[in-house]
Amino acid sequence: MIRNVLSIAGTDPSGGAGVQADLKTFSALGVYGMTVATALVAQNTRGVAAIHHVPAEFITRQLETLFEDVRVDAVKIGMLGTADAVRAVAAALTTYRPPYVVLDPVMVASSGDRLLDANAVSTLCEELLPVVDLVTPNLAEAAVLLGEEEAATEEEAFAQLERLQALIPGLLITGGHLRGNESVDLLAIEGSVTRLRSPRVQTRNTHGTGCTLSAAIAALRPKRGDWASAVSDAKDYVTGALLAADALEVGGGRGPLHHFHEVWS
């Protein structure tokens, strides 16, 4: 059976992040992709120029129309932007209860542009976190969720992971921003913590890495027996996409990953 996986996120005209990257990831991993747009973002590989937030009522309408017709096997949530959008998505998930929900708490773009209103963070913690299964913050996002300084070492990241476990049932803190020859992610599921290590890829083309990882986890979870297997295989997919990223020539800033590195010759 081909799985149906939904991305709820903003757009990226350059195709490296947002719903465009999610659809590429879904296709590369053999699932049928669907999207609900939460924001129209004018951006390229250099940064974000403007954001048009989709009204919460229309986000709700998109979700209702989809869930009432199509079986949704997993959901990936990316950029939401506003507190009203967070509430709309949380309400729909509470009503329709898809089997697996992965939240990438997109707060700041890799260019430094803020993508989630400051007043929406508390709404996300109070209303959305209780209805998702796995949250995938990077170090900066984990710090925002805790109201602390960003972790600078693996030990500090581990300590923040332990504090976040009180808020979040499933947690993957991505350590790509740490220094060192390895990229270390920390996965916490039902009290068990696993360190996932992979060689650090030397490339400037990292635009959309977080979007792609969370989308890959959502795509693989219905096809794997547990979260650990889905996360491990998703991390391998992202590593391959980073290793092949320099084959693409997209923009003059941080270019995208090569989502179809295993498909294109």
Image (cartoon, rainbow, N blue to C red):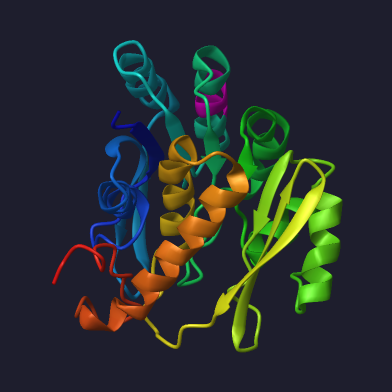
Q: Is residue 167 left or right of residue 73?
A: right
Q: Is residue 148 visible?
A: no
Q: Is residue 221 visible?
A: yes
Q: Is residue 134 above or below residue 91?
A: below
User: Is the stretch drawn in magenta largely helix, strand or loop?
Assistant: helix
User: Percent x, y for residue 1?
Assistant: 30, 28
- Which residues fall within the magenta stretch? 87-91
Q: Please state, as top left, top right, bottom left or bottom right, where the C terminus lies in the image.
A: bottom left
The answer to whether residue 4 is magenta is no
User: Percent x, y for residue 211?
Assistant: 44, 56
User: Percent x, y for residue 62?
Assistant: 33, 23
> Residue at the location (36% across, 79% down)?
243
> Residue at the location (65% across, 54% down)?
172
> Residue at the location (37% across, 17% down)?
67
Q: Is residue 10 above or below residue 240?
A: above
Towards the viewer: 47 or 101: 101
